[in-house]
Amino acid sequence: MSAGDGRPQDREWRRRAAAVLPAGMYGHMAAQKLPEGYPQFMDHGEGCRLRDVDGREFIDFMCGWGPIVLGRRHPEVEEAVRGQLSRGDVMNGPTPVMVELAEVLTGMIPHADWTVLAKNGTDATTACVSTARAATGRRKILVAAGAYHGAAPWCSPSLGGVLPEDRAHLDFFEYNDAASAEAAADRAGDDLAGIIVSPVRQELGRRQEHATAEFARGLRGIADARGAALILDDVRCGFRLDLAGSWEPLGVRPDLAAWSKAIANGQPLAAVTGREWLRAGAEAIYVTGSFWYSPVPMAAALATLRVLRETDALERIRAAGETFASGLRAQASALGLEVEVSGPAQMPLLQFAGDEHQELSRAFADEAVRRGVYLHPTHNWFLSAAHGPEDIARALEITDEAFAALAARV
């Protein structure tokens, strides 16, 4: 990613980063190869707005890649964080806030009889897989082809440093194809430990695909018939679509679920929730970290979940997403541009017809970010409760300009 002209601070921080960080940036930020106009280094945020190190302001539709659900610096969450910090953070053991949060999660999520708290989504999905194997004494895990479940060797989208042995006991099925999953389960035979699946198919550069009720029920039936664990990877969607779990509207409940992102409105936290029959498996595995008992993110989660439960925040996020998506469709249509906005309204993705190499998506996102709307060309976006009507209206003014600039180019 080049900083371009007119952004001296971002350019200087990239120069310094290149000397001390592999490739100057690692992880998802390095992998995305964002268009020219995107900043790499940020300075501060408030609500749904971000400012980069050069002072440019953006209406943000990535929400830190999902964790921000109420808006940055939400007052109730900030108060909870300050209150816990005043008493201390990392101690020699957990504080009561861990038990309080576990009580909230098990009381709120219908399938949850217990919970384990961790730090990020990969922690949670990996712990789910390990728990399923420990509880069943089996090895095989079924995974939807192309699905993202984290950055550990068993699920990393990159094969750098990954050994064949790391994935020796995975088998794959097609999303929304229960027959494909049944065939994979047949191949696993009596060695099937679990099936891991996301509530929505969300792959880079591909239209988002909601799970059908038939597919979800099919996976539930396969797991039940074979004594395996159905694992819902709710890291990305959880606590943004439905507080009880993203497949709750389909009437399908998992045996294990992985949660992170929106759970603590930006504080580093993840959770695994599970049914009683898997408790012994969770007790048998060894998962931990020096910072996993940190009470500050847990206090933030208690505040975040309280606000989500007691206000209309989720409904406002949905409504804002629907207004934004319908506005984008209308703007593109008026200019003769054929687009599709797919996925949940709270987590949309815009794509252009025939844009096989995402060139139009990248050009549109670049035009938008240069004008002050931070979108992503290939990853799904996120909305928060801080995206008010005025923010959506202003964002649509900017995207209208971006569409017009793109239409003039093509």
Image (cartoon, rainbow, N blue to C red):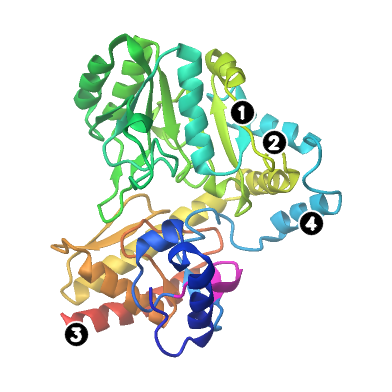
**Residue topped by disc 4:** 82
Residue shown at the point (29%, 49%) measured from the top left: 208
Q: Is the magenta stretch mostly helix, strand or loop?
A: strand
Q: Which of marks 3 and 4 is nearer the N terminus?
A: 4
Please state which of the two labelled residues, at mark 3 or mark 1, is closer to the viewer. Answer: 1
Q: Name which of mark 3 and mark 2 comes first in the sequence.
A: 2
Image coords of residue 339 (percent x, y): 21, 64
- Residue 400: image location, x then y, percent: 32, 78
Magenta segment range? Answer: 39-51
Separation of marks 2 and 4 at Cα, in angstroms: 17 Å
Q: Decide if residue 344 is on the left or right side of residue 214.
A: right
Question: Does dot 3 land on a helix, a strand or a loop?
Answer: helix
Question: Is tag 2's residue or tag 4's residue first in the polypeptide sequence?
Answer: 4
Indicate the amino acid at tag 2: Leu
Rendered location of residue 56, percent (x, y):
51, 82
The answer to whether 266 appears left or right of 84 in the picture is left
**In the figure, residue 246 lies in which quadrant?**
top left
User: Pointer 4 and pointer 1: residues touching (CB < 8 Å)?
Assistant: no
Q: Looking at the picture, which amino acid does disc 3 mark?
A: Ala
Residue 115 is marked as 1
Q: Quadrant of the N terminus?
A: bottom left
Residue found at x 43% / y 43%? 150
Q: Which residue lies furthest to the bottom in this view?
A: 6
Residue ID for mark 3:
408
Q: In the structure shown, which secondary structural element does the residue marked by tag 2 occupy?
A: helix
Please report the residue visible at 59 percent of the width from the left and 61 percent of the height from the top: 71
Compared with 194, 82 (above or below) is below
Name the kind of residue labelled 1 in the image: Thr
Could you give the CA–CA distance between mark 3 and mark 2, rounded to whole angstroms?
53 Å
Question: Label 2 near label 1: C-beta < 8 Å?
Answer: yes
**Residue pointed to by mark 2:** 101
